[in-house]
Image (cartoon, rainbow, N blue to C red):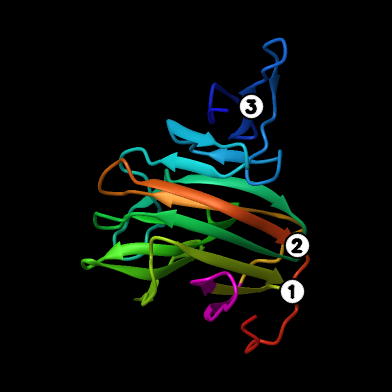
Amino acid sequence: MPEATMSRRTIIGGVAALTLPSAVHGEAKAHVVLGRRDGAWLNGPGRWSANDAGDLTLVTDRATDFWRETHYGFTRDSGHFLGFATPAAFTAQLRIRGDYQQLYDQAGIMIRLDERRWVKAGIELSDGRPMLSSVLTDGRSDWATSPYTHDPRDFWMRATVAGGVLRLQVSADGKVWPLVRLAPFPVAPSYRVGPMACTPEREGLRVRFSDLRITPPLGKDLHDLS
């Protein structure tokens, strides 16, 4: 069966709910993407598809980004984000596969309350090499990077939010999860979490997302890397 491609968007609360045509009588129905039917796009890309397993593949639009003010002085809220609802405390993890080629090409996971409160984390091309990058925004953005020594074209991100604390982890194999960042994060009754991709300097980054899991917070010791 060929991959299903986006045919229309239903706008709900400023984001686009996923609707794809059904093979039965031509009706529209919510399509399973990353194992769920409740995904909602913020700035959905012009090109994306979901295969029979629910894996999401997207191709970025031109000049897409998430950033607020710091250093550059501008605000950008045009990046691609497919958000799924969470409870007040949760762990989410996601597999990301992409080929980063130009400055600031990026893909990973995002957790979002609104345009002023969010975090994005994943691989970002900077200074000619793929970096493990995280941007935490609470009114204004920061940016933390470090060299990524494994294959940046295939990695996992994990985020845990509980009790006003954010814990970010990365994995090269989906088994061992070193710490990326520990930070305060706004307390809320629910969030949106899911795949994120941006290309501030171009268009055309192709990224495949799979293996999304949203569970109760793992509650593991900070140095437990499992």
Residue 175 vertical placement versus 190 (above, below) = below
Q: Is residue 3 left or right of residue 53?
A: left
Image coordinates for residue 97, horizontal then vertical, percent: 44, 55
* Residue 2 in sight from this viewpoint: yes
Q: Amino acid at mark 2?
A: Thr
Real-space Cα distance between discs 1 and 2?
8 Å
User: Circle 2 — which element?
Assistant: strand
Q: Which residues are magenta?
A: 170-184
| Magenta region includes residue 171 | yes
Quadrant occupied by the C terminus: bottom right
Q: Amino acid at mark 3?
A: Thr
Real-space Cα distance between discs 2 and 3?
25 Å
Judging by the rendered image, the residue that carries numbered circle 2 is: 215
Q: Is residue 189 left or right of residue 141?
A: right
| Magenta region includes residue 95 | no
Q: Nearer the viewer, residue 116 or 177?
A: 177
Judging by the rendered image, the residue that carries numbered circle 3 is: 19
Q: Earlier in the sequence, mark 2 or mark 3?
A: 3
Which residue is farthest top?
A: 25
Q: Nearer the viewer, residue 101 or 88?
A: 101
User: Circle 1 — which element?
Assistant: loop
Residue 80 vertical placement versus 3 (above, below) = below
Residue 52 vertical placement versus 79 (above, below) = above
Q: Nearer the viewer, residue 107 or 63?
A: 107
Q: Are marks 1 and 2 in contact (CB under 8 Å)?
A: yes
Judging by the rendered image, the residue that carries numbered circle 1 is: 218
Q: Is residue 222 left or right of residue 96?
A: right
Quadrant occupied by the N terminus: top right
Which residue is farthest bottom?
A: 223
Quadrant hosting residue 219: bottom right
Residue at 35%, 62% (x, y): give it: 124
Residue at 78%, 66% (x, y): give it: 216
